[in-house]
Image (cartoon, rainbow, N blue to C red):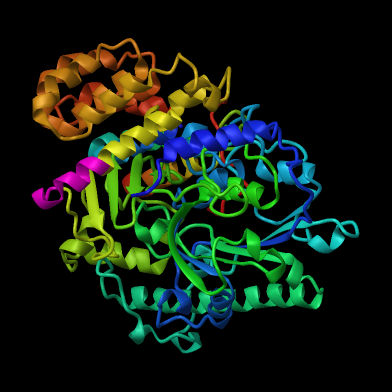
Amino acid sequence: MVRVHAINSLEAVGGEVARAAVGKARELVSRQDAPTYERGYDVRAANHLIEMYE
Amino acid sequence: MKPNLKAIFVMACFTALLYACTGERSKTEPVELPNILWIVSEDNSPFFGCYGDSLATTPTFDKLAKEGILYENAFANAPVCAPARSSIIAGVYPPSMGTENMRSTYPTPDVIRFFPQYLRTAGYYCTNNSKEDYNMIKPDSVWDESSNKAHYKNRKEGQPFFAIFNLTVSHESSIHKSIPAEALRHDPDKMVLPPYHPDTPEMRHDWALYYDKIEDLDGQVAALLQELEDAGLAENTIVAYYGDHGGVLARSKRFLYESGTRVPMIWRFPKKYEKLAPAAAGTRTDRLVSFVDLAPTMLSLTNVAIPEYMQGYAFTGKQQAAEREYVHLFRGRMDERIDLIRAVRDEQFRYIKNYMPHRIYGQYIEYLWKAPSCRSWEAAYKAGKTNEAQSAFWQQKPAEELYDVSKDPWEVNNLADDPAYADVLVRLRNENDRWMRAIKDSGLMPEGMMSIKNKTQPTYDYVHSAEYNFDKIKHAADISTMRDMEKLPEIISLLHDEDPAVRYWGATGCLILADKAMEAKETLLQLLQDESPDVRITAAEALCHMGAKDQATPVLVAALDVDNEWYGYMPSTASKP
């Protein structure tokens, strides 16, 4: 769960660091159905980061 | 003085070997096997009249307790569904198998069989209606039927049955949607709130709604018992009821307190099988039992030898073990938020070791936040309307917690720093250490790192091999998570270790000490290039507290691209925790 770990860290730091990841979080959400990506928790975490920092 | 558990365990293993240890029936004597009706409810603490709850309306449970044995000290090893069910189905602690994190699908090691497989070998008709959620890949042939139509009535004539009915009416989702106050059957104004919950209208509403759901649950259990009676099977069937973990308002389910792990458990033995019962009907027992004990107990009741790999102890039946002195509890990742906590409970105290004290309890979790009561608690805290006990959920955790649950059942008075309890603290800390070592706790590896190991072998096999540096990793985790500045030089030395799990804990130690660990900055900058993503991420987060955001931010952002096809993932259709 590397992506979940990263998003947890980004949100814990917050501010401009978290805002810098919004674009990448959007990419993550958009490819959620790709078969090699875990679906669910990384997307949930990414959605929250987007909601909080876009 | 209680018997030596280790000696008892050795004797049990010896007995198991005598039984040939392959799940075959004991051939010591022919017996008629009892039917077992196993009723499970979701997400509820013991909010029943028979547990002394004056707000409860639970006539069926109260009657069942009078006819059976009520366990006062029954515990889910995990405070959430999938890891809790993983411990039940395997009889092995999930941190020993890599199945402690909420929803993952890692391989099951060859040595472990799901306990219904043993029952089927013994001749049972095994049905599951219907939730599985074992947190690992299910082997073939676990059930004769597993669906929402599964039922013991489909067995062959004369065949004994083991039948699970999992009732979902009290699941967390039941409080996600508020209903009009006039539609509630329990009065919000009469609710007695735990001291950690602020007194908000939403909190009172959700508590009242949840008591309604418990009442509904009681009715559903009544129907199952009546069905058994009508089928003429009550006198041949042991009824085993328990809740799958505590719940359900915030700081219960998912959290390693009494509210998240202490569960209702009542077993009823018909007269025909009263010799298998641990006590007479109507007994209330304070014996400590936990979910990892359920599989060996089922085997004990059905005359199947308990395999050596199982880590629980039978608490009734012919292979009943001595009483436990402790139960062991754990919390890993909860949905999309990572955490790592271990706990030990004896008859009076609960010890908690927080391996991620820098993460608050109240990390946002999408599913938890669906409850209006949870959102109202967060809003009250942000508005400065919460007292100390109510605010603690939203602040960094202590490294250790200790509660006297006999005096403080809601666990708001942390005694870990009280010199009067120093002996208790050390005793329970040592017991936690002993247990983690005994089961080869895999949770000390970040989940991403553990998943990479899973490429070649199940986690259980890896952590039980010489390759797993448990003692070294455990020591690193211990010194890094105590917020002890005197340990900083040793923590920094961990950053150079060849084992990535050790480097991870070194970086975590620096993160916990934040700007007080500036001495580690140069080494942490080097770790931004580490081969392990988890080490890179942790080093980067630590550096954000050391004036190095410019270097750290690209590393954190790039980690969102890391592809982990080997990592367990939650099926998109199984979103209900």
Q: Residue placed farthest to the bottom in the image?
A: B182
Q: Nearer the viewer, residue B134 or A15?
A: B134
**Is residue B337 in sight in this rendering?**
yes
Instruction: Provide the residue span drawn in magenta.
Output: B417-427
Judge whether residue B41 is colored magenta: no
- State the residue at coordinates (74%, 42%): B28
Residue B262 rendering spot, x and y as whole percentages: 42, 59
Above or below for B52 versus B539: below
Query: Is residue A2 shown left or right of residue B564?
Result: left
Residue B218 rendering spot, x and y as whole percentages: 58, 76
Above or below for B288 versus B265: above
Query: Is residue B75 shown left or right of residue B60?
Result: left
Q: Residue placed farthest to the right in the image?
A: B157
- State the residue at coordinates (38%, 13%): B531
Above or below for B209 versus B472: below
Residue B423 rendering spot, x and y as whole percentages: 17, 45
- State the residue at coordinates (16%, 66%): B387
Query: Is residue A31 shown left or right of residue B512?
Result: right
Tell me the quarter of the picture where residue B473 sits.
top left
**Is residue B310 in sight in this rendering?**
no
Q: Nearer the viewer, residue B344 or A4?
A: B344
Tell me the quarter of the picture where residue B359 sits.
top left
Residue B500 rendering spot, x and y as whole percentages: 36, 17
Judge whether residue B422 is colored magenta: yes
- Predominant secondary structure, magenta span: helix
Task: Give the total of numbered labels.
Answer: 0
Query: Is residue B8 shown left or right of residue B147?
Result: left
- State the residue at coordinates (51%, 38%): B311
